[in-house]
Amino acid sequence: MPANTITEVITQLTNIIAQSEADNNRAGYFAALYKKVTMMVASKISAGYFDDNARMEQLDVVFANRYLNAFENYTQHTSCTAAWQLAFDACNDWPPMVMHHLLAGMNAHIALDLGIATAIVAEGSAIESIHGDFNKINTILCDMIEEVKNCLFSMWPLSQFISKLNMGKVENDLAGFSMKIARDAAWQVAVDYSLCADALAQQSYIAGRDKSVADFGSRLLHPGALLQTVAGISRVFEFGTVPDKIKKLGA
């Protein structure tokens, strides 16, 4: 059932997290992180952080419903976008690390869903009016990088070695740069989608974009023999049960 408010979004994410913990479902990783981000956005809206806070709540809800709908369709064995199909299918596999599950979910949700949701909320020529608030969302995400990194490192003892090499700043710079690339790509999707003349053109655009995003997601999850071997070795040292990892991401 579609959410109508941020509060309803948080409630539905809470339900997905609880069910994922009960079922040992790795889909709970992304849901836990998404709930944390949504709660942060909700607090920013309450504080009047955005230029148009009412519209940003609407965007948050439209954006979230694309994920919630994809998750519901997948669990009911009906169709969802290829990008989400790939991310959810990966949850059935042991080799991907928590980081890979999060990246696959972020790829589907930011590279495909965010731009479409933005164009729906700010239709046609109104698209430019939301650009400033759109960029503020990226600022919120970048501010959470350190917290998410520390959470992932707590599951992966090899992080102590990385920390000794003083790579933290480099990692944060790379993560921030990646978020900027993702933000800019999502904004271009919003602009392109806003120019679609009718529903048929919109469907055609989504299908083409979905294929590109799914192809990139596949490369994230299956980067080649050498990198997969390294990732597989690293995965052995990622400690904790699925519910434990979900709880850490949501803490």
Image: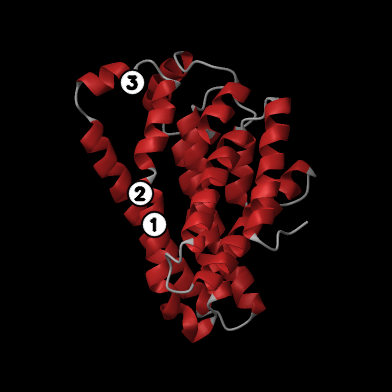
Q: What residue is shown at x 22% (from left), y 37% (from top)?
A: 170
Front position in the image: 70 or 137: 137
The reply to whether discs 3 and 1 touch (Cβ–Cβ < 8 Å) is: no
In this rendered view, identify the residue nearer to me: 126 or 44.
Answer: 44
Q: Mark 1 points at which residue?
A: 138
174 relative to 47 in the view: left or right: left
Tell whether 154 sits left or right of 30.
left
Asked whether 168 or 248 is in front, the reply is: 248
Q: Residue at x 42, y 36 (%)?
A: 148
- Dot 2 falls on a residue whose secondary structure is helix
Disc count in the image?
A: 3
Mark 1 → mark 2, Cα distance in angstroms:
6 Å
Would you name the residue on which mark 2 appears? Answer: 142
Residues at marks 3 and 1, CA–CA distance in whole angstroms: 26 Å
Residue 159: image tag: 3
**Is the Cβ of the residue at disc 1 closer than 8 Å to that at disc 2?**
yes
The extreme left residue here reads: 166
